[in-house]
Image (cartoon, grey):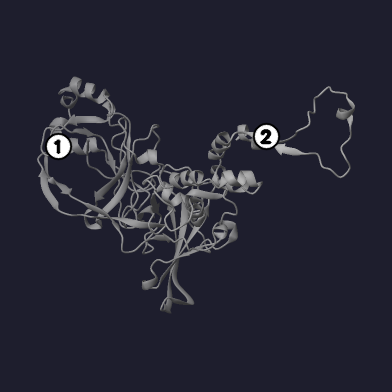
Amino acid sequence: MDEISRFLTFTSLSPSTSSDTSDSAQQAPIMGTPRTKISALLGLPAEIIHHIFTLLDPISLADLSQTCHLLRTHAQDGKLWYETVQKNVPAQRLLSPGPCNTWKDLYAAHHPFWFLTRHKLWFSDKANTGSAMTGSLIVARFDPRRGCIEAYRLVAEQGDHTFEHWPLDPTVIIHAFNPRVRLWLDDPVIKLDISSPNPGKRLHREVLMPTGVSQGIRSLLFRSLHIPTSHQNKSMSLWPPEIIPTNERVRNDSPNLFRSDSQKPRTLAEASDTTFRIRKWIDFGSLGVSIGLRMGEDVMTFSTLPEECYTPTKEKPWQGIWVGDYSGHGCEFLVVLQPDKHSQPAISRSSSQQSSSSYASANPEFASDEVASAGEDDANEQAEEAPYSGRLEAIKLTGDPNVPRGEYTFIADDIGRNGLIRIAEEQPFRGARVVESRGHVAARGFIGGPLTFSGELPEYI
């Protein structure tokens, strides 16, 4: 922006450093006639002005358009506003501004909520039913035909199941499933029409959405106030939890359900672009007419993940959003991370049992030094090859009454040489790498042993 600012400074057309001492140069200006000044920006070729404008954010672009007629003409360029809108809808290629006349009108219609479609994937601290254990996962998108922003719940059905006993330990049942993942299109979580309230007031107010009206449910969407890292402490209830990587965290607990103005952003700089809130309640009335009686009011806080954390790469092929079958709890979504830095997980409850000891207890003959000697050289060579290195962390994005959302479900501390147990020879895992891991198990209500991890099954990768 420093390069741009120098074009916006005003300079006199008269040469201020001239050594001319002629009478015309020394002549004082006529009384009442102001000295003529012009921005150096206005003297630049149109192509350069356009390039400079592409570097501006939408608010600066709109502000600059109010300075003079020439800059307004440049700032109204449809290509600028098309690119601005397109950057916020990365999952699709837009061809027209839909029901709006111009791209600028389309952007203004949904300002300041374009971050919803820009980040796409959102997970909440509570489910639609209000359960603080399960949470929910939604996908936001833009409908170019209707010109609206909407978001729907991502759901998974268990599908067909197969069961078989583990050949090395018949007491262990191997459970396979074929999930069906889809969007629940019958009930949008978010819906912003182009006819929603004045965009200039959306930052400071809660926007009523036309969702759940037929069921008597009212929903308000509003921005959240991000908490600077320097102001965060252990006593705060923050979303998302510390174990989930994110650029911003916000409070997700408030005695007055975030009604206070001090709990909402006053400027765009204070508003979080990676979190937002939805207020829901049951409103008794008829034919969509409210009688002002709210029942079961609650606030859901949503957050997103940095895209690089769940996008697989050649070096990190296992990171991504996964579906797990948690038996009676049904399908749950989890994010598998392959962090660059190894950090000690902050586990607060339940107990721990290592997969290596579990395997050894089921197969005593492998508990001796023979485990290390059998094919040790080949295994170590394979372990050193990428991508078999580093750590795997699986964190629940949706949870259940035993282990809730935002908690680890398993960790493999090292999928390389140090964590390798063996190469599986039994079916159905023949050829797979078995590495040490820790699984999280807790009683209902997330009750278990303190400060440690739980669980136990080997991880096959």
Front one among 9 and 408: 9
Give the labeled residue for mark 1.
429
Q: Residue furthest top?
A: 377
Classify residue 408 by image quadrant: top left
Classify residue 150 by image quadrant: bottom left
Q: Earlier in the sequence, mark 2 or mark 1?
A: 2
- Residue 213 picture location, percent across and down: 40, 71
Can you see residue 392? yes
Residue 40 - label: 2
Q: Amino acid at mark 2?
A: Ala
**Label 1: how many Cα within 10 Å (few below 14, some 14–19, many 20+):** some
Front one among 263 and 91: 91
At horizontal 75% and vertical 33% (from top left) the residue drawn is 13
- Residue 203 picture location, percent across and down: 55, 56
404 versus 292 height, above or below: above
Label 2: state its secondary structure.
Answer: helix
* In-image side of 421 versus 33 (left or right): left
Classify residue 74 by image quadrant: top right
Quadrant where the image shows the N terminus = top right
Front one among 86 and 439: 86
Q: Amino acid at mark 1?
A: Phe
